[in-house]
Amino acid sequence: MQMWWGYTPAIDFQEYLIETKGVEIPVLNILVVYGADARHILQTVAKKYRHPRRKINFYVVEPLVDFVAKQMLLLTAALEPPHVLGLQEKARLWMEIYGNLLVRPSTVNYIVQKSRQLVLMVTDESYLDFRLPLVRLNFMKFKELDALESIFHFWQNNTLFNSVFMWDIRLRRSLGVRYDHRDGVFDWDYQMQLKPKPGGERVNYQEYKHWRETGVAFTWIETENTEPNLTFASGVSAKGEKLVSLGYLGNIDNYFYLEY
């Protein structure tokens, strides 16, 4: 099972920095091991204005290239300039990519467009410097870079990723004989595991139940989520001339709502 989301809320690393009075720290090096979703990086960058000016280097270590690919896309979306994406649309787009197994057609178009750019970023270092200058791939092996490129190609067009079927299969295997009584299982998980956590009371039960049932965490009245989110595909590899995946292997009950 893959954890597309971490267990802990996003933190600003600089808040935990122990500084000695009169001693400046011009460069801060931070090692992030299995962060999974770039939440700590985004939170630290967003809160940077609260701290003394300094350069920050993030060194990210992930167990799977899948997580690196997803984080590159999330960072790209988060850092889009205002004239490309308005604030509201950017927030919705980012949330869909982050937490929805089904997304809007417009979000799919964005993923396809950016995955083409991401392929060029992996294969052309000068293009990476131009499009996403905050990211460096220098420490990745050639085999890992090839895998990264395959993932971005997979995102562009793949009709074999039936996310609805995959989620239902995972749910049935997880619940077993309790599947026919899953509403009661969801209610117990919400009341006993999610709600007591700090901030858990802010999560609406109907939204939580909808996510447990469908894999769709965020919805808006005027839109409909109909297309599979290919960024949740795990284990992408080449099979002849085709790119295939192992399907959706992510968690189906992790409470990522509390991370932000």
Image: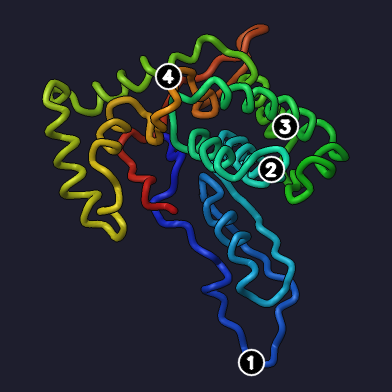
Tell me if residue 24 comes above or below residue 92 in the rendering: below
Give the residue number, with chain letter if any, for mark 4: 163
Give the residue number, with chain letter if any, for mark 2: 80
| Front disc: 2 or 3 | 2
Between discs 2 and 3, the one toward the N terminus: 2
Give the residue number, with chain letter if any, for mark 1: 21
**Distance from the alpha carbon under mark 1 to that under mark 3:** 43 Å
- Amino acid type of the residue tagged 3 in the rendering: Leu
Would you say the residues marked 1 and 4 are in contact, meaning their CB atoms lie under 8 Å apart? no
Tell me if residue 168 comes above or below residue 253 in the rendering: above
Mark 2, secondary structure of its residue: loop
| Front disc: 2 or 1 | 2
Would you say the residues marked 3 and 4 are in contact, meaning their CB atoms lie under 8 Å apart? no
Between discs 1 and 4, the one toward the N terminus: 1
Between discs 1 and 3, the one toward the N terminus: 1
Tell me if residue 64 comes above or below residue 113 in the rendering: below
Give the residue number, with chain letter if any, for mark 3: 118
Would you say the residues marked 2 and 3 are in contact, meaning their CB atoms lie under 8 Å apart? no
What residue lies at 54% left-to-right and 28% top-to-bottom? Answer: 231
User: Residue 216: where, in percent of width, then height?
Assistant: 38, 30
Would you say the residues marked 1 and 3 are in contact, meaning their CB atoms lie under 8 Å apart? no
Q: Residue furthest right?
A: 126
**Distance from the alpha carbon under mark 3 to that under mark 4:** 23 Å
What residue lies at 33% left-to-right and 45% top-to-bottom? Answer: 255
| Front disc: 4 or 2 | 2
Mark 4, secondary structure of its residue: helix
Which residue is at the front of the view, 19 or 61?
A: 19
Mark 1, secondary structure of its residue: loop
- Amino acid type of the residue tagged 4 in the rendering: Ser
Mark 3, secondary structure of its residue: helix
Q: Is residue 193 left or right of residue 36?
A: left
**Label 1, residues with CA under 10 Å away: few <14, some 14-19, many ≥20:** few
